[in-house]
Image (tube, grey):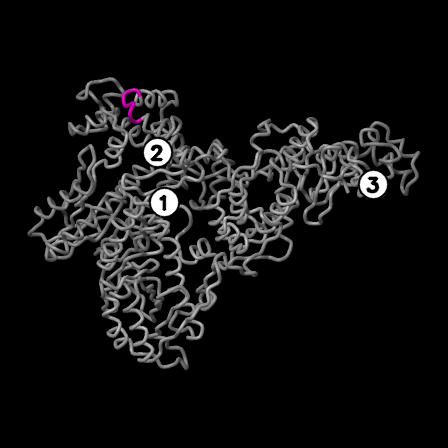
Amino acid sequence: MPTIPNNPLVLVDGSSYLYRAFYAPPHLTNSKGEATGAVYGVVNMLRSLMSRYNPSHIAVVFDAKGKTFRNDMYSEYKAQRPPMPDDLRSQIAPLHAIIHALGLPLICIPGVEADDVIGTIALKASKEGRATLISTGDKDMAQLVDDNVTLINTMTDTIMGPAEVTEKFGVGPELIIDLLAMMGDKADNIPGLPGVGEKTALAMLTGVGGVDKLIANPQSVLDVTFRGSKTMPKKIEDNKEMLQLSYDLATIKTDVEWDDDWAPLEIQPQNRDELIKLFGEMEFKRWLAEVLDNKSAFSTATATTTNEVQEATPAIDVEYETILTETDLANWISKLSKAELIAVDTETTSLNYMEAKLVGISFAIEAGKAAYLPLAHDYLDAPEQLPMEYALEQLRPILESDSIKKVGQNLKYDISIFANAGITLKGVQFDTMLESYVFNSVASRHDMDGLALKYLGHKNISFEEIAGKGAKQLTFNQIELDVASPYAAEDADITLRLHQHLWPRVEKEAKLTSVFNDLELPLIQVLSDIERQGVLIDSMLLSQQSDELAQKIDELETKAYDIAGEKFNLSSPKQLQALFFEKLGYPIIKKTPKGAPSTAEDVLIELALDYPLPKLILQHRSLSKLKSTYTDKLPLMVNTETGRVHTSYHQANAATGRLSSSEPNLQNIPIRTEEGRRIRQAFIAPEGRKVLAADYSQIELRIMAHLSQDKGLLTAFAENKDIHKATAAEVFGVHFEEVTTEQRRRAKAVNFGLIYGMSAFGLAKQLDIPRKEAQTYIDTYFARYPGVLKYMEDTRALAAEVGYVETLYGRRLYLPDIKDRNAMRRQAAERAAINAPMQGTAADIIKKAMITIDQWIKSETNGEITMIMQVHDELVFEIDESKADALQAKVCELMAQAASLDVTLLAEAGIGDNWHEAH
């Protein structure tokens, strides 16, 4: 076995190992049923390589999507291979993410295979006398072996230098291509010489020489003794072209264009936070534990999966109780009343807070000590449980006490569940979901199971484990107590342990503590109240709109058929591909990952500039989405008890701090189209009341003026000028009064485009102007507003230095890709660095306004006004008709006072019988 010198250059055939790991046992999945075995296998191999050879330079190389130059040479190349299994495809993105987080350079070059990239780098290294180790299971790579290049197959632990290649294949590395060409390769569909196997090929190669000699003189094989030698000259003569093609297909390309430099292959520091997140999601327990313990991910050559659980933190002996008697309850009430902090969690029949029925409550008072109080388990032979009314009345002094502090995971949900049961949960001091979100909004999804894996190295009992899956899944009241009680008690226990882990980290940073205490925590109750209040809709109007939309959709389909000259499915990408690019000859803008012409929305938008049919398709898609998502669906979402629609607001979704909503998603009701605006007409006020809608005027531009301290922007806002018109005057060099509507429109695109990091290319596309002209607009803008340019440059530099940006209130957005060597990822992170402080500050301001207005409503208005919705920079209320003017003025005043900036915050409001009229 050849000796590997110290610190070799390691080149990993990632694609080879990916497939081999996928098909090799064990076929692992995580608790969500997601396949993880291929990721595990490849990462385990990388860990083994790194621990064994400790290289300073490495490249993990994968095949790029799409066809390669070999497909152009031979259309049948690899044509027989089945499509990639979905369970394998789904593992590619997380595998690549883990490799990046491990600090390992990853290369993927379109048009060539991983072999070709590896061959190119290996040849360069060998010429420089650099010891190179190629990690692969692919026999084709043997052609690359020389005195400096060695192969290792980590799955079989075999190492091959020139001598080992000769021993294994019967010829040296210099004849491996010839051997492959003559034998052919069923896996790659390389034809080879008909009927020639390994023995015959070896006989000819050792007796005559390579393929070039055989093609030049087929008769030479008559001098070699082997079975069938007499007929071989004619076979070679008849198949010369196929033999040459086979040789060319089997030859690894060694002149691929790549960054001809060793620096990009240098191993980088590991991204600990990202590894914690990814190992947690994959549920690679031992690796997660190692990283949590601040060990290197390469500290050992072996690894353990979720089947071999090892805690990242010291094991805790748990004491979980089930409260079934009055004495049990009294004992726990005594413990709870004395505890400094209690974790509380509810178990219910549904995730829908308006429909869910309370089934039980769990508590924890210290790590490992928790109890479950079942109240409504009604399966056959369920044990007798305490009456709900009695238990809640006994607990009311605890639950409604301000002095007994509570912590929970997503307590907004539990607040609503308790409210529906007649309990006002008070003393809410902490929420682990929000602690995680404030600490690092991009580190994880902030759900309890994910946080437990990430921060505690603990795998929670999953709901599917105890309730089953799919249509047969049980609701919690149907689950037997011996199974339900540990699950419920664990929820409270883990919540308390997560708080003990997370809060000290938040508390270290005064700004983060302030974001949590002043914004996120008080907002929980505000959002819970808004959710349970709901919004009134006119179902009859929506039904009418659905009918009208259906008619318009039908009309669009008829027009589309007329243009196409045939009927087709407007929603079918395959049919659109055939129609657009085969029948109608539209230009191909871009391709799908599988190499087919794309019909994605951005492609249709570009095609719609020149062709009528794509424009009709876009209109059809837009109207169909409105119909299915809103006009058809909203009436079905009306709660039968309240007669209202109740959305769910999410505090811990958007990395920037913005709120989002679902079921229904109120944030995405379009307002740029007539049909979208009409949907807002169905959001109505009850009799005797009106809808008041108030939103901030150009809040992100005002924040930009404050952050950048640009004198031009500050002056424009101080003089209360139309900011887009003022920008147009500066950019186009005309007097303010002379600005045209078109100039203002273009200036508006520049103003908002720069906030979101839009390039000249993007601006040119949006305004349908030449790129050079768009660049001129941007250059002129920065010349007139130099403070903005300086802010952007300083922000990018600071983000690259510290790895994050902050809002005015101290909310932090980490940017893990800000130093990425991949230009696209790095540039995306830089755009986020510029935008996040503005968007995040705007989100913080409206949260502050919501909290302030909620306090005013509850203390001073006597039910005259109710907050019913939050959408981006807008708040929507129901108000008494008789107090409309005064309430409108007060809301605008409180919104304007929510932040103190160097420019005036301006809130504008309207009043109407529905949301559309008020907006």
Q: Which residue is mark 3?
A: 170
Q: In the rendered image of this protein, does residue 121 appear above or below residue 385?
A: above
As helix, strand or loop, the secondary structure at mark 2 comes to helix
Please tell me whether mark 3 or mark 2 is closer to you in this view: 2
Q: Which residue is mark 2?
A: 834
Type of the residue with mark 3? Gly
Q: Quadrant of the C terminus?
A: top left
Front-most of residues 39 and 747: 39
Distance from disc 1 to disc 2, alpha carbons, whole Å, reads 14 Å
Label 1 Cα crowd, 10 Å radius (few <14 / some 14-19 / many 20+): many
Q: Which mark is residue 655?
A: 1
639 lies left or right of 822: left
User: x, y (%) of residue 351?
Assistant: 35, 62
User: x, y (%) of residue 262?
Assistant: 60, 29
Label 2 Cα crowd, 10 Å radius (few <14 / some 14-19 / many 20+): many
Distance from disc 3 to disc 2, alpha carbons, whole Å, reads 61 Å
Residue at horizontal 33%, vertical 60%?
Answer: 408
114 lies left or right of 807: right
User: x, y (%) of residue 810?
Assistant: 30, 41
Q: Which residues are magenta?
A: 783-788
Q: Which mark is residue 244?
A: none
Distance from disc 1 to disc 3, alpha carbons, whole Å, reads 59 Å
Residue 54: say if magenta: no
